[in-house]
Amino acid sequence: MRVLLIDDDPRYRALIRHHVTCRWPDADVVTWNPVRRGVPPRELLGQGYDAVLLDHAWRGGDGWACLGDLASREGFAPIVFLTPAADPAEFDRAVALGAVAAIGKAKIDHARLTEALAAAARRQFELQSAWRGSAAGVEAQRFGAATLRGYRRIRELARGSVSELYLAESEAVGELVALKITRAVRKSSGVDQSFERFLQEYEILRRVRHPNVVRIHELGVMDDFAFIVMEYFRGGDLRRRMRQPLAPDVALGYAIEICDALAAVHAGGILHRDLKPGNVMVRDDGSLALIDFGLAKHAALELEITDHGLIFGTPHYMSPEQGHAQPVDARSDLYSLGVMLYEMLTHEKPYVADNPMAIIWQHAKAPVPTLTGAAATIQPVLARLMAKDPDARYETADEAAVAIRAVRRALPRESATA
């Protein structure tokens, strides 16, 4: 038995879990806090669950309206609705809105709850069996030329020369996921390193477990394809938050989270080498996660997939040494963070020009930009992050985080939200 419980009260969630595991000791009760995460996104159908338990209300939310929304989604998992009390009229109202059953929340009827869940599970089994064998189900499990069981394709997010990225629903994870897939074939010349780079990205992420680094759910190989299943961020990337200058307190808070992620990455012997707002994602709860390690380099891996003397990365955020194809270390990522911090505070990139090489030249030769107004107190931190000489920068991400936290604590109250 696997149940998705949509409710914001941790004590009540614990009570529900107790009732469910009394009947099914190995049951998996997955909680969804609608106060923190909102209602489940429109694309989610709960296909990885036997049943969904939905509360009638939460702080700032209407479970009745949510019931109508979820039940109207074709293929959504069977819903057992929690009404305020054991009122037959409310039970009928819930069923009319699409629930398969309803129980009173005030005093849980254990037998009624477990029987409702058992009936929902039987119905879900029948629905999913029919769907998987249908033409629509077969088509929804196709990702390009590959068929991946246990995943439902929702839409393509991006396509590149090496891989394709899809939004999908994973039965095993019970969530929307980002699924990146590539063909596992080498060119006869032996110079196509895309598959090796793809596998190295997984190997890098497998070694790093940190709240501010994207979560990897699975690596799989199917026929001539390999795929990585990753956490999906419906809040988009940090660029969306940077459409206007951010308050100093907010910008420094984001910089601290990025520092914490870099500290974990660097501790694993990894350099990101492509740090930019598009590679920093925002979760539903507002926290950040670092993604896209396709250009990253792991010091311990034997495979070297970057040719000596070639420049990889994004010129606007590239350190002077990286822009000139010189050896880089963790301090190069810190320089990129400095560029992002300046842009968060000013809504401007520090260096602009008509062509990439001119931007690379400015990173190496132009003065560090100056912060003004409420952000002026952050200038010493910015100057060290964006120092032209790596030896003048912070030595580690942890050291940078300490400095950023200190300047954030020292912000005048009126500057924090300016």
Image (cartoon, rainbow, N blue to C red):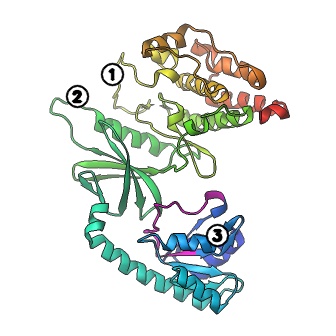
- The amino acid marked with disc number 1 is Asp
Horizontal and vertical percent for residue 161? 29, 36
Residue at numbered disc 2: 191
Position of residue 7 in the picture relative to residue 294 (left or right): right
Horizontal and vertical percent for residue 231? 48, 51
Residue sitting at the far top: 365
Q: Evaluate if marks 1 and 2 touch, with contact meaning CB atoms under 8 Å apart.
A: no
Q: Is residue 49 magenta?
A: yes
- The amino acid marked with disc number 3 is Asp
Residue at numbered disc 3: 7
Q: In the rendered structure, which disc, 1 or 2, sits on the residue that comes first in sequence? A: 2
Residue at numbered disc 1: 307
Q: Nearer the viewer, mark 3 or mark 2?
A: 3
The CA span between labels 1 and 2 is 11 Å
- The amino acid marked with disc number 2 is Val
Q: In this orientation, which residue lies closer to the viewer: 68 or 196?
A: 68
